[in-house]
Image (cartoon, rainbow, N blue to C red):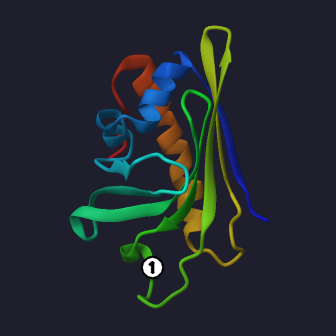
């Protein structure tokens, strides 16, 4: 089974890192204008919506909240929005994203695990390319209050 796993140490408390993952004004900076729409209750829908192929309210990613433990763990299923499918009736495979936070001295260890991939999921490569940039944006935002100018 395919898995993407990254660990990064961020010069900020778990509370600050958590805020970067879920607070709308910070998520919007990290995810290029997209925000999370969700109740964050386990079993409920989660959507990342923002500027994209379908206009200002493009559905980029959606799934189901699996765990929401503030400052510790945030897990959800992951499917891409319709505009990312090559054909409208093509298979939209589901994977899983896990954000894990752990205090380490005066820093926070942030672990991202994106797993449960189907071997034919075409979004694997895009995720593999995007996660290092998103993680760098999280680290930079928490430590400096700004994100990188990645374009």
SS category of the residue bearing label 1: loop
Position in image of residue 122 (x %, y %): 57, 74
- The quarter of the displayed image where residue 120 is located: bottom right
Residue under circle 1? 85
Give percent across and percent down for residue 35. 33, 47
Q: Residue placed at 25% from the left, 71% from the top?
A: 54
Which quarter of the picture shows residue 102? top right
**Relative to 44, 98 lies left or right:** right
Using residue 86 as the reference point, say whether residue 123 is left or right of it: right
Q: Nearer the viewer, residue 72 or 92?
A: 72
Q: Is residue 50 left or right of residue 30?
A: left
Asked if 12 appears above or below 94 in the picture, the reply is above
Work out whether residue 147 or residue 35 is closer to the camera in this orientation and state it: 35
Residue located 43% across and 31% down the image:
20
Q: Which image quarter: residue 123?
A: bottom right
- Picture coordinates of residue 41, whole percent (x, y): 49, 47
Residue lying farthest to the top in this orientation: 106
Rendered location of residue 108, percent (x, y): 61, 20
Q: Is residue 54 above or below residue 127?
A: below
Q: Specify few, some or many for label 1: CA neighbours under 10 Å numbering under 14, 14-19, or 20 or more.
A: some
Residue at horizontal 28 percent and vertical 69 percent from the top: 53
């Amino acid at each position: 089974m395919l898995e993407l796993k990254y660990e990064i140490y961020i010069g900020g408390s778990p509370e600050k890192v958590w805020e970067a993952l879920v607070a709308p004004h910070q998520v919007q900076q990290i995810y290029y204008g997209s925000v999370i729409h969700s109740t964050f209750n386990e079993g409920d829908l989660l959507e990342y919506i923002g500027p994209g192929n379908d206009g200002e309210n493009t559905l980029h990613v959606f799934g189901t909240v699996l765990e929401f433990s503030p400052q510790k763990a945030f897990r959800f299923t992951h499917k891409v929005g319709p505009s990312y499918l090559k054909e409208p009736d093509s298979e939209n495979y589901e994977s899983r994203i896990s954000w894990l936070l752990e205090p380490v001295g005066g820093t926070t260890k942030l672990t991202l695990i994106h797993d449960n991939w189907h071997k034919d999921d075409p979004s694997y490569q895009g995720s593999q390319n995007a996660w290092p940039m998103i993680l760098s944006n999280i680290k930079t935002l928490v430590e400096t209050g700004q994100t990188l100018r990645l374009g």
